[in-house]
Amino acid sequence: MERRKIRLNISSIFRGVDTLTAEEAKKLLDDEKKADVELIDVREPQEYEEGHLPGALLIPMSELPNRLEELDPSKTVVTYCRAGIRSRSAASFMKGQGFNNVYSIKGGINAWNGLIASGAYEAGMFLMDDIKNPEELVFLAYALEDGTRLFYGQIKDFVPDEESKHIFASLESAEEKHKKTLFEIYKKVRGEEITEDSLKKEPFADFMEGGVSRVESVTWLKDKDRTLLDILEFSMHMETNSLDLYMKISRDIKDEGTKKVFGALLDDEKAHLMQLGKLLGSKVTN
């Protein structure tokens, strides 16, 4: 069988997330139609207790995939977090699940309080609507898992405490298992025997869950002004986009056996998100 080289345009799988400045969000929430607006705080409970916006419903990013049924897709949804990273991921994820009018507050609660964070990482969000071929979807998942595995391996070496190092090491190991599983699925959907080495020249080498470059991400996070909270928020962003991707694949894959495997991977990614959220919450109070 002649092997068809997968060619995907990296720009075709990103989407911007609609954002509101703090002033725009205040105006929207002060409007007479504010009853039709749902304000969602996607931080962890410890952060919420320290201070939150009036009327905000707490749904931590780590719990959002399992709590979407609590929200009304017909309403305008505004998400916020500490500095805007988690809320962007939440908004992107919700768009993929049928919420058409969803926004993220740029700069998060820091911007609302007048503390404008500098150097926010404007990471891309996945847009999978133009990719219909299951082979391409599975390959994309494989490539991004590999990039994320390498990322976690690097991150664990410069986080400041042993608990964080242990969690990132466990995530690195989990991504390696996911990568191996996805490679076997990829061979199945291609219908031919191939080696992992043969995939290294394909597009998306070095990209991670979340659609960003591993090298650029590590460089950004190594900046002296970055904190452990920045690292954890960024990691949660990647895991959320992985959830988005796996949900898309699960809908498009017809083979029931393969669909079941992706269901298990989806559960793993939800667990990773919860693990990172719990760690972030514990560090907020330290």
Image: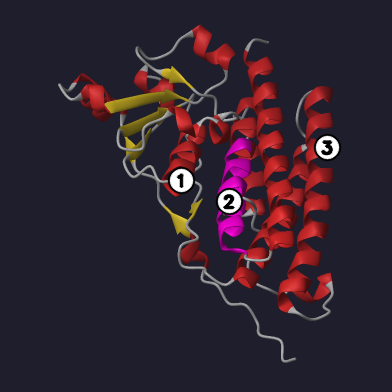
Point out the tag, 3 or 2, that comes first from the N-terminus. 3
Residue most extreme to the top: 50
Crowdedness near tag 2: few (<14), some (14–19) or many (≥20) residues, C-alpha within 10 Å: some
Residue beneath disc 1? 97
Circle 3 or circle 2, nearest the eye: 2
Most common SS among magenta residues: helix
Instruction: Classify 10 Å Cα crowding around label 3: few (below 14), some (14-19), many (20 and above).
Output: some
Q: Amino acid at mark 2?
A: Met
Residue matched to label 2: 247
Residue 107 coordinates in the image, percent (x, y): 41, 30
**102 part of magenta stretch:** no
| Disc 1: CA contacts within 10 A as few (<14), some (14-19) or many (>=20) | some
Secondary structure type for disc 2 = helix
Q: Nearer the viewer, mark 1 or mark 3?
A: 1
**Looking at the image, which residue is at 55% across and 48% down?**
244
Q: Which residue is mark 3?
A: 170
Compute the Cα span from label 1 to label 3.
29 Å
Label annotation for residue 179: none
Q: Could you say whether the residue bearing mark 1 is in a helix, strand or loop?
A: loop
What SS does tag 3 mark? helix
Residue 283 appears in which quarter of the rendering? top right
Magenta range: 236-253
Question: In the image shown, does 190 or 179 lie closer to the viewer?
Answer: 190
Quarter in which the N terminus is drawn: bottom right
* Outermost front residue: 256
Q: Earlier in the sequence, mark 2 or mark 1?
A: 1
Residue 174, quarter of picture? top right
Q: CA distance from mark 3 to mark 2?
A: 23 Å
How far separated are the C-alphas under marks 2 and 1? Answer: 9 Å
Is residue 153 placed above or below 192 in the rendered structure?
A: above
Q: Are marks 2 and 1 in contact (CB under 8 Å)?
A: yes
